[in-house]
Image (cartoon, rainbow, N blue to C red):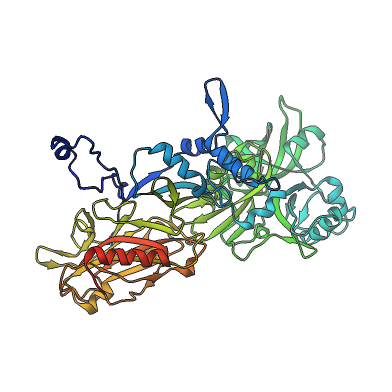
Amino acid sequence: MKTKHIFLLALASVVFASCENYFDEKYLGNSDYKPSDVRTSMTYTLTSDDVVAIGKQCTHKGNDTVPSVYEQKALSLCTPDDSSAYTNWLQISKLKSFTEEASADIYVPMFMAQKFPYLDAGTICNVTYPLYEGKSARVEPFRFTTPYTLTEDDYRTIWNGRGASYISSETEAALPAFLAKTFPLAADGKIIVLTYNYRSAEPDSIIPFLPYDCSVAQLLEAKETEEHRLTGTVGTVKSTIYGRFYLVDGQDSIYVYGLSDEEGNRVWKDKGIQKGDLITVKGYYSDESSEPQFINAVYVSHTPANAGVPRRMSQQASVQDGPKTVIYQLKDGAWSIFQNDQLTAALALQPALYEQMGSDVIADAQKTIGDWLRRTFLYPHDKEIYLVAYNTASGYTADEWTYNGTDFVMNTGFVDDVMSFVYNGSWIANISTYYTTPFVGDGPADFTMQTVALDGLNYIWRYQAAYGMTASAYVSGTNHPVEGWLVSPKIRLKKSTAPELTFYHAVRYGNPVSNLEWLKVKVTNNYTGDVTTTEWKHLEFTDSIPDGSNWVFRNAGRFDLSEYNGESIVIGFEYNTTIGEVPSAPTWEIQDLLVAEKEEVDAFIKAGNEKRGITQ
């Protein structure tokens, strides 16, 4: 069995690329000598405070308040007819993030100049920063959601005056026509989150349905002596044998005296009723004791506290009686239940869940709904997407959660992006270079290593300052069947046109045929965080790889990434000697990696070959 070990590498420490000896020069009498501070693979991650500072509108000089350098930059980009550059810049402070319109390449150079004023020309820094890409287009219609709860008049309208205060399973078919009549001016795409009392059974003929459906609050207000159907949450339990408990509805509660089935048999244990369950019972109101009671209670149905819509079921699939909320959308002039083929499930949080939480709104959706999804969908599949509509203090909205193979993750619209910046007298964004690292002398940057099969070894990939990132399965005269990966950070190709990957590598030992099977370069646009659950595309070597006869570093060729234009990718280097026999395990060394536009790759390979004395 393969065991998985994930080794996360710390960001590489910053080192000087220059070789001169400051003290030798100084004491030889060259008093004008200054050491150069050129950092060839520097990394920096913008903090939340950094981003807020970039979005700050003004600075203070003495008693004067003046626009910050960032505000001045935003203003300089405006024209008399277009001030969008300034309003876009204001979003940085609001979101604590950059956007496509207020992008990092515009404002980060000024931050770098203030943060690192003493660096010398030639310095390259990969900056990680927050970027707001926006939420999924599937949730956009929910920005204008209207919640609506059926009234008693609505029920009478739907039932043509028959008097039932609920919607039955068959009557739900009449709801689209009701919505069309109620919202005649709705625009196409409009979302209605509809809540109503639901019952699976139909009323008898045209006789008004009895008992009357109500909540605890309605019962206490009406105090009618006729039979009622009462829905609420199981509160304090007096006796699980005789089914004596408090039924809670918001701040209201009533003591339920006994609970049985239609034949008079006690049902508490048989039905598995527990505190917190949403339960519907029928019986009679009584005020003959010291507190209001619901007597001769008969069990109708209940929903366990952790219940929800089963995986891959539609919103209409639940047959639990009680309050129900369903999402409707107007499409092509007709109302129908909201659905999208790209979603595993689209559903609204049900009234029972709000009751359990004791609140009408969701304050922390990321935690509350995330926990609910984990309890509800016990066997999700990797990459499944769940849309959930819910009520907040500012109204109804919706968000999506994706199952990443391990957990449900809320799609907030925020991502971590990386951009390369170069200093040559002033900082500029290298927008045609998407990622670069030499490895040699500068550490593993923000690459990670994951081991899938060790076969008794301590590691497969490691960093060596003189050689870069190295992998081997040969130890103490033994060739081991192993699998280990070197994985890049996310590389963003949002503005790319003809991006390519290239790097230099050396391969020693092994054999040319097996090495092509064992040493692979792969790419994905949907990295799960685990190489074994990610769908990878194999990038074939465009040139023959080194034959294993020497330690000479050669360019690995060019790997076309243009099919990923507009996306974010992750590069994976797979060292896998578990395929076939291992007569001689190779050592693989990688350095000088670049993801950039074709012209940048041309210059990079030319300079790299000249540095190594390669004439081809």
Residue placed most toward the observer, 235 or 5? 5
Q: Can residue 544 be seen in this view?
A: yes
* Residue occupying the far left of the picture: 477
- Residue 97: image x %, image y %? 53, 44
Residue shown at the point (76%, 57%) measured from the top left: 168
* Residue occupying the far bottom of the picture: 513
Count of numbered tags? 0
In which quadrant is the N terminus drawn?
A: bottom left
Residue placed most toward the observer, 203 or 442? 442
In which quadrant is the C terminus drawn?
A: bottom left
- Residue 52: image x %, image y %? 51, 36
Residue shown at the point (23%, 77%) measured from the top left: 514
Q: Is residue 192 left or right of residue 560?
A: right
Rendered image quadrant of residue 256: top right
Q: Is residue 420 above or below residue 574?
A: above
Residue placed most toward the observer, 512 or 424? 424
Q: In this view, does 394 lie above or below 603?
A: above
Q: In this view, does 66 lie to the left or right of 263?
A: left
- Residue 31: image x %, image y %? 20, 34
Rendered image quadrant of residue 505: bottom left
- Residue 369: image x %, image y %? 56, 46
Q: Can residue 204 be seen in this view?
A: no
Q: Is residue 210 left or right of residue 436?
A: right
